[in-house]
Amino acid sequence: MSKNKLAKFAEMKNFCNVIQPQDDEYRYKTFEYKGKWASDFFKNNNPIVLEIGCGRGEYTVALAEINPNINYIGVDIKGARIYSGAKIAIEKNLHNVAFLRTRIDLLNNYFNQNEVQQLWITFPDPQPKKQNKRLTSAFFLNIYRKFVIDGGIINLKTDSRLMHFYTLQLLKENGLIPIIYTDNLYEDNCLDSILCIKTYYERMFLEQNKKITYLKFLLEKDKPLKEINKFSLNE
């Protein structure tokens, strides 16, 4: 591990907006902020929104700037990525931003039922050979159902047509109707300030003339999702 990365990890231990729990210990006891993120961590009653696989946290920070009355939590397992967003949030004095370093499949350890109103999944790894590892697979959506409110909003923004059309097909197979979907976001008339947020990678994809897709749908708590047969798409 590089000295620069070690220095970032050491600095991040003192960041007030970063939580790095030891996952194993919460298999046997309750995480201190579970069910209490708004009241005990953010010290307010504002809604909780997660960015899943937040990377550098650019989208998390930008969302927090646009909506100061919403609490945003970026989730990622890579500490070196989280460092960037957390440091920027501190420098900008944003008190409605936090970062949680953990695996996505363990999120039930950290959030209570109905604690989260909305999820953002921005430019995730499309996992072309591992369908169940896609962050919109039935496996992960059924995890989110346990802590997202009934009818909570899921937003998927990606350059991957595989990820976009796979998710559309999964919704169709499970009888869910998307609210908005487009396979070319910047040529359609569904843009707002939130959808215009561009991360480092999104700007890079646009420079490569890749089309950005967007999908918005509701997650129903009482309806377990079933995985579809193996789905592939030539991109």
Image (cartoon, grey):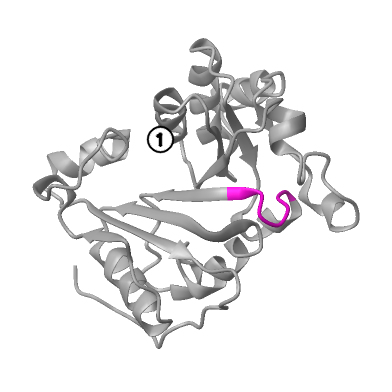
Name the residue located 32 percent from the left edge and 78 percent from the top edge: 169
* Residue stretch rendered in magenta on the structure: 110-116
Q: Foreground: 217 or 45?
A: 45
- Residue 90 highlighted magenta (yes or no): no
The percent position of residue 18, horizontal first and vertical second, equals 65, 29
Q: Assess disc 1: are there few (<14), some (14-19) or many (≥20) residues with their C-alpha within 10 Å of its C-alpha.
A: many
The percent position of residue 149, horizontal first and vertical second, equals 59, 57
- Residue 112 highlighted magenta (yes or no): yes
Name the residue located 32 percent from the left edge and 36 percent from the top edge: 194
For residue 159, above or below residue 20: below
Residue holding disc 1: 59
Amino acid type, mark 1: Tyr
For residue 18, above or below residue 225: above
Q: Left or right: where does residue 61 sit relative to residue 163?
A: right
The percent position of residue 185, horizontal first and vertical second, equals 18, 50
The percent position of residue 159, horizontal first and vertical second, equals 25, 53
